[in-house]
Amino acid sequence: MNTRHFSQLPKPYLAYPKVIQGLIFKKPKGEKVLPQVEYVVDSFQVDAKHLKAYNEVCGFKNNGYIPAIYLAVLSQSLQMHMMTTEAFPFAILGLVHIRNQVKQLRKVGVNEKLTLSCNFGDLKPHDKGVQFDFITTAKVGNEVVVEALTTYLARQKTSGGAGAKPAETKTPEYTLSATWDVSENTGRRYAMTSGDFNLIHIHAVTAKAFGFKQAIAHGMWSKARALASLTLADAYEADVWFKLPMYLPSTVEFMTAEGNETEFLIRNAKNQKPHVTGTVKAL
Protein backbone atom coordinates (compact mmCIF):
# COMPACT_ATOMS: atom_id res chain seq x y z
CA MET A 1 0.00 0.00 0.00
CA ASN A 2 1.25 3.46 -0.90
CA THR A 3 1.23 6.12 1.82
CA ARG A 4 0.93 9.84 1.11
CA HIS A 5 1.81 12.23 3.92
CA PHE A 6 0.38 15.70 4.55
CA SER A 7 1.57 18.43 6.87
CA GLN A 8 -2.01 19.67 7.25
CA LEU A 9 -5.52 18.70 6.27
CA PRO A 10 -6.04 19.38 2.55
CA LYS A 11 -8.85 21.82 1.72
CA PRO A 12 -11.97 19.96 0.49
CA TYR A 13 -12.89 22.67 -2.05
CA LEU A 14 -9.63 22.13 -3.93
CA ALA A 15 -11.02 18.76 -5.05
CA TYR A 16 -14.30 20.18 -6.40
CA PRO A 17 -13.09 21.01 -9.94
CA LYS A 18 -12.15 17.35 -10.41
CA VAL A 19 -15.55 16.29 -9.05
CA ILE A 20 -17.23 18.44 -11.72
CA GLN A 21 -14.97 16.93 -14.38
CA GLY A 22 -16.50 13.59 -13.45
CA LEU A 23 -19.77 14.80 -14.95
CA ILE A 24 -18.04 15.27 -18.29
CA PHE A 25 -15.50 12.46 -18.44
CA LYS A 26 -17.07 9.08 -17.76
CA LYS A 27 -15.25 6.41 -15.77
CA PRO A 28 -13.97 3.50 -17.91
CA LYS A 29 -16.00 0.31 -17.89
CA GLY A 30 -14.58 -2.94 -16.63
CA GLU A 31 -13.60 -4.42 -13.29
CA LYS A 32 -13.78 -1.94 -10.41
CA VAL A 33 -10.70 -1.83 -8.17
CA LEU A 34 -10.11 0.57 -5.28
CA PRO A 35 -6.68 2.23 -4.96
CA GLN A 36 -4.36 0.69 -2.39
CA VAL A 37 -3.38 3.95 -0.76
CA GLU A 38 -3.35 5.59 2.66
CA TYR A 39 -3.47 9.34 3.26
CA VAL A 40 -1.94 10.54 6.53
CA VAL A 41 -1.90 13.95 8.22
CA ASP A 42 1.16 13.43 10.38
CA SER A 43 0.51 16.01 13.08
CA PHE A 44 -2.19 18.57 13.63
CA GLN A 45 -4.17 20.21 16.39
CA VAL A 46 -7.86 20.95 16.12
CA ASP A 47 -8.78 24.59 15.50
CA ALA A 48 -10.75 25.48 18.64
CA LYS A 49 -12.69 28.24 16.85
CA HIS A 50 -13.73 25.88 14.06
CA LEU A 51 -14.68 23.17 16.56
CA LYS A 52 -16.84 25.68 18.45
CA ALA A 53 -18.70 26.57 15.24
CA TYR A 54 -19.23 22.86 14.50
CA ASN A 55 -20.50 22.24 18.03
CA GLU A 56 -23.00 25.08 17.75
CA VAL A 57 -24.44 23.75 14.48
CA CYS A 58 -24.71 20.17 15.78
CA GLY A 59 -25.62 20.78 19.43
CA PHE A 60 -22.47 19.57 21.18
CA LYS A 61 -21.20 21.32 24.30
CA ASN A 62 -17.90 23.20 24.25
CA ASN A 63 -16.40 21.22 27.12
CA GLY A 64 -12.75 20.99 26.11
CA TYR A 65 -13.12 17.65 24.34
CA ILE A 66 -13.43 16.74 20.65
CA PRO A 67 -16.54 14.80 19.57
CA ALA A 68 -15.34 11.64 17.87
CA ILE A 69 -17.63 12.30 14.91
CA TYR A 70 -15.88 15.65 14.36
CA LEU A 71 -12.65 13.79 13.55
CA ALA A 72 -14.61 11.58 11.14
CA VAL A 73 -15.88 14.76 9.48
CA LEU A 74 -12.36 16.17 9.19
CA SER A 75 -11.27 12.96 7.49
CA GLN A 76 -13.78 13.65 4.70
CA SER A 77 -11.28 16.13 3.23
CA LEU A 78 -8.81 13.25 2.89
CA GLN A 79 -11.55 11.12 1.34
CA MET A 80 -12.37 13.79 -1.24
CA HIS A 81 -8.73 14.03 -2.32
CA MET A 82 -8.34 10.25 -2.38
CA MET A 83 -11.28 9.98 -4.76
CA THR A 84 -10.12 12.81 -7.05
CA THR A 85 -6.35 12.24 -7.03
CA GLU A 86 -6.14 8.46 -7.19
CA ALA A 87 -7.53 6.05 -9.82
CA PHE A 88 -10.96 5.96 -8.19
CA PRO A 89 -13.35 3.80 -10.26
CA PHE A 90 -16.71 5.51 -9.54
CA ALA A 91 -18.36 8.85 -10.30
CA ILE A 92 -18.24 10.78 -7.03
CA LEU A 93 -21.53 12.61 -7.52
CA GLY A 94 -23.33 9.29 -7.87
CA LEU A 95 -22.24 7.95 -4.48
CA VAL A 96 -24.76 7.52 -1.65
CA HIS A 97 -23.62 7.67 1.98
CA ILE A 98 -25.51 4.76 3.58
CA ARG A 99 -23.78 4.06 6.89
CA ASN A 100 -21.35 5.55 9.40
CA GLN A 101 -19.67 4.00 12.40
CA VAL A 102 -17.56 5.87 14.96
CA LYS A 103 -15.67 4.32 17.87
CA GLN A 104 -14.19 6.53 20.59
CA LEU A 105 -11.68 4.65 22.75
CA ARG A 106 -11.20 7.56 25.15
CA LYS A 107 -11.99 11.26 25.40
CA VAL A 108 -9.73 13.43 23.25
CA GLY A 109 -8.75 16.88 24.50
CA VAL A 110 -8.91 19.91 22.22
CA ASN A 111 -5.22 20.66 22.79
CA GLU A 112 -3.90 17.18 21.99
CA LYS A 113 -1.71 16.63 18.92
CA LEU A 114 -3.24 14.15 16.52
CA THR A 115 -2.36 11.97 13.57
CA LEU A 116 -5.25 11.31 11.16
CA SER A 117 -5.15 8.60 8.49
CA CYS A 118 -7.60 7.24 5.94
CA ASN A 119 -7.63 4.33 3.52
CA PHE A 120 -10.12 2.35 1.44
CA GLY A 121 -11.81 -0.81 2.67
CA ASP A 122 -12.96 -3.63 0.39
CA LEU A 123 -15.64 -3.55 -2.29
CA LYS A 124 -18.71 -5.58 -1.30
CA PRO A 125 -21.90 -6.49 -3.17
CA HIS A 126 -25.09 -4.54 -2.47
CA ASP A 127 -28.55 -5.19 -3.83
CA LYS A 128 -28.39 -1.83 -5.61
CA GLY A 129 -24.77 -1.99 -6.75
CA VAL A 130 -21.55 -2.19 -4.75
CA GLN A 131 -20.49 -0.66 -1.46
CA PHE A 132 -17.15 0.26 0.02
CA ASP A 133 -15.71 1.82 3.17
CA PHE A 134 -13.33 4.57 4.09
CA ILE A 135 -11.41 3.54 7.21
CA THR A 136 -10.33 6.46 9.40
CA THR A 137 -7.95 6.28 12.35
CA ALA A 138 -7.03 9.07 14.77
CA LYS A 139 -4.04 8.65 17.07
CA VAL A 140 -2.34 10.55 19.87
CA GLY A 141 1.25 9.40 19.55
CA ASN A 142 0.96 5.64 19.00
CA GLU A 143 -2.36 5.40 20.85
CA VAL A 144 -5.49 4.91 18.75
CA VAL A 145 -8.20 7.17 20.19
CA VAL A 146 -10.88 7.20 17.46
CA GLU A 147 -11.77 4.83 14.63
CA ALA A 148 -14.42 5.46 11.99
CA LEU A 149 -15.97 3.61 9.08
CA THR A 150 -17.80 5.52 6.34
CA THR A 151 -19.79 3.35 3.92
CA TYR A 152 -20.81 4.46 0.43
CA LEU A 153 -23.02 2.83 -2.16
CA ALA A 154 -22.12 3.07 -5.84
CA ARG A 155 -25.34 2.36 -7.74
CA GLN A 156 -25.08 0.05 -10.71
CA LYS A 157 -26.95 -2.78 -12.37
CA THR A 158 -26.72 -6.07 -10.53
CA SER A 159 -27.60 -9.65 -11.37
CA GLY A 160 -30.00 -9.61 -8.44
CA GLY A 161 -30.12 -11.69 -5.29
CA ALA A 162 -26.62 -11.10 -3.90
CA GLY A 163 -26.97 -7.93 -1.91
CA ALA A 164 -25.61 -6.70 1.38
CA LYS A 165 -28.60 -5.80 3.53
CA PRO A 166 -28.84 -5.16 7.24
CA ALA A 167 -30.12 -8.17 9.15
CA GLU A 168 -33.81 -8.21 10.02
CA THR A 169 -34.26 -7.19 13.65
CA LYS A 170 -37.20 -6.58 15.93
CA THR A 171 -38.33 -2.96 15.95
CA PRO A 172 -37.37 -1.35 19.27
CA GLU A 173 -40.06 0.16 21.50
CA TYR A 174 -39.08 3.77 20.97
CA THR A 175 -40.23 6.65 23.11
CA LEU A 176 -40.24 10.29 22.05
CA SER A 177 -37.24 12.16 23.45
CA ALA A 178 -37.51 15.44 21.55
CA THR A 179 -39.05 17.20 18.56
CA TRP A 180 -36.70 19.24 16.39
CA ASP A 181 -37.59 22.02 13.98
CA VAL A 182 -34.78 21.77 11.44
CA SER A 183 -34.39 25.10 9.64
CA GLU A 184 -34.02 25.64 5.89
CA ASN A 185 -30.45 26.96 6.26
CA THR A 186 -29.16 23.92 8.21
CA GLY A 187 -27.39 22.52 5.15
CA ARG A 188 -25.56 25.78 4.48
CA ARG A 189 -24.59 26.23 8.13
CA TYR A 190 -23.29 22.68 8.37
CA ALA A 191 -21.43 22.99 5.06
CA MET A 192 -19.49 25.97 6.42
CA THR A 193 -18.05 23.83 9.21
CA SER A 194 -17.83 20.42 7.52
CA GLY A 195 -16.55 21.59 4.12
CA ASP A 196 -19.23 19.43 2.44
CA PHE A 197 -20.81 21.80 -0.09
CA ASN A 198 -22.63 19.12 -2.05
CA LEU A 199 -25.32 21.05 -3.91
CA ILE A 200 -28.13 18.77 -2.75
CA HIS A 201 -27.67 20.21 0.76
CA ILE A 202 -27.24 23.90 0.01
CA HIS A 203 -30.46 25.24 -1.51
CA ALA A 204 -33.74 24.01 -3.01
CA VAL A 205 -32.76 25.39 -6.44
CA THR A 206 -29.50 23.45 -6.61
CA ALA A 207 -31.05 20.33 -5.05
CA LYS A 208 -33.74 20.24 -7.75
CA ALA A 209 -31.01 19.93 -10.38
CA PHE A 210 -30.20 16.54 -8.83
CA GLY A 211 -33.79 15.35 -8.54
CA PHE A 212 -34.71 16.49 -5.02
CA LYS A 213 -37.77 18.65 -4.41
CA GLN A 214 -35.94 20.57 -1.65
CA ALA A 215 -32.48 20.68 -0.14
CA ILE A 216 -31.77 17.76 2.19
CA ALA A 217 -29.89 17.66 5.48
CA HIS A 218 -26.42 16.13 5.64
CA GLY A 219 -26.54 12.62 7.09
CA MET A 220 -23.53 13.38 9.27
CA TRP A 221 -25.31 16.41 10.72
CA SER A 222 -28.26 14.17 11.63
CA LYS A 223 -25.96 11.69 13.35
CA ALA A 224 -24.10 14.43 15.20
CA ARG A 225 -27.37 16.02 16.34
CA ALA A 226 -28.48 12.65 17.72
CA LEU A 227 -25.19 11.99 19.54
CA ALA A 228 -25.24 15.50 21.00
CA SER A 229 -28.64 14.69 22.50
CA LEU A 230 -27.45 11.55 24.29
CA THR A 231 -25.32 10.98 27.38
CA LEU A 232 -22.21 9.30 25.99
CA ALA A 233 -19.69 7.18 27.88
CA ASP A 234 -16.00 8.12 27.78
CA ALA A 235 -15.52 5.15 25.44
CA TYR A 236 -18.37 4.23 23.09
CA GLU A 237 -19.32 3.04 19.63
CA ALA A 238 -22.04 4.67 17.52
CA ASP A 239 -23.41 3.06 14.37
CA VAL A 240 -26.02 4.64 12.09
CA TRP A 241 -27.84 3.76 8.88
CA PHE A 242 -29.05 6.61 6.69
CA LYS A 243 -32.56 5.95 5.41
CA LEU A 244 -34.77 8.54 3.66
CA PRO A 245 -33.75 12.16 2.94
CA MET A 246 -34.62 14.83 5.50
CA TYR A 247 -35.96 17.74 3.49
CA LEU A 248 -35.24 21.26 4.68
CA PRO A 249 -37.04 22.78 6.48
CA SER A 250 -38.53 19.90 8.41
CA THR A 251 -39.98 18.90 11.77
CA VAL A 252 -38.62 15.59 13.02
CA GLU A 253 -38.95 13.42 16.09
CA PHE A 254 -35.95 12.03 17.97
CA MET A 255 -36.92 8.64 19.40
CA THR A 256 -34.87 6.46 21.77
CA ALA A 257 -35.05 2.97 23.24
CA GLU A 258 -32.87 2.02 26.21
CA GLY A 259 -31.38 -1.42 26.89
CA ASN A 260 -27.90 -2.92 26.83
CA GLU A 261 -27.32 -0.27 24.20
CA THR A 262 -29.23 2.88 23.26
CA GLU A 263 -31.13 2.64 20.00
CA PHE A 264 -32.40 5.78 18.32
CA LEU A 265 -34.49 6.88 15.40
CA ILE A 266 -34.95 10.23 13.68
CA ARG A 267 -38.25 10.28 11.80
CA ASN A 268 -40.52 12.75 10.08
CA ALA A 269 -43.04 14.15 12.55
CA LYS A 270 -45.91 14.09 10.03
CA ASN A 271 -45.62 10.79 8.17
CA GLN A 272 -43.24 9.05 10.62
CA LYS A 273 -40.97 7.86 7.83
CA PRO A 274 -37.38 7.17 9.05
CA HIS A 275 -34.43 9.41 8.24
CA VAL A 276 -31.76 7.79 10.45
CA THR A 277 -31.61 4.72 12.70
CA GLY A 278 -28.72 4.00 15.01
CA THR A 279 -27.25 2.42 18.11
CA VAL A 280 -24.82 3.63 20.75
CA LYS A 281 -23.09 1.32 23.18
CA ALA A 282 -20.50 1.86 25.87
CA LEU A 283 -17.17 0.06 25.43
Image: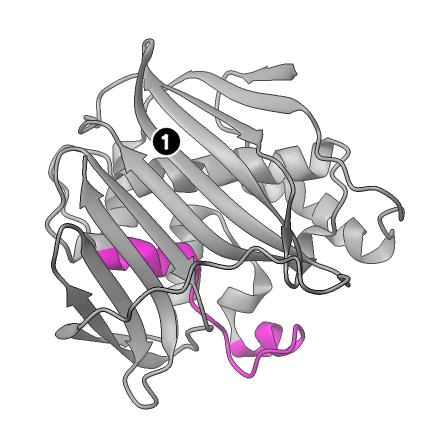
Look at 23% across and 35% down and name the residue there. 66
On-image quarter of the N terminus: top right
Q: Is residue 172 above or below residue 152?
A: below
Q: Please state the horizontal and vertical placement of residue 165, each as a whole percent of the image.
A: 52, 59
Q: Residue at x 18, y 72 (%)?
A: 174
- Name the spot of residue 270 as percent of width and height, x first: 31, 90
Between 280 and 186, the one nearer to me in the picture: 280
Residue depicted at x 42% and y 67%: 217
Q: Quadrant of residue 84?
A: top right
Residue 113 colored magenta? Answer: no
Name the residue that disc number 1 marks: 147
- The answer to whether residue 249 is left or right of residue 57 is right
Residue that extends furthest to the bottom in the rendered view of this protein: 270
Assign a secondary structure to mark 1.
strand
Which residue range is magenta in the image? 204-226
Amino acid bearing label 1? Glu
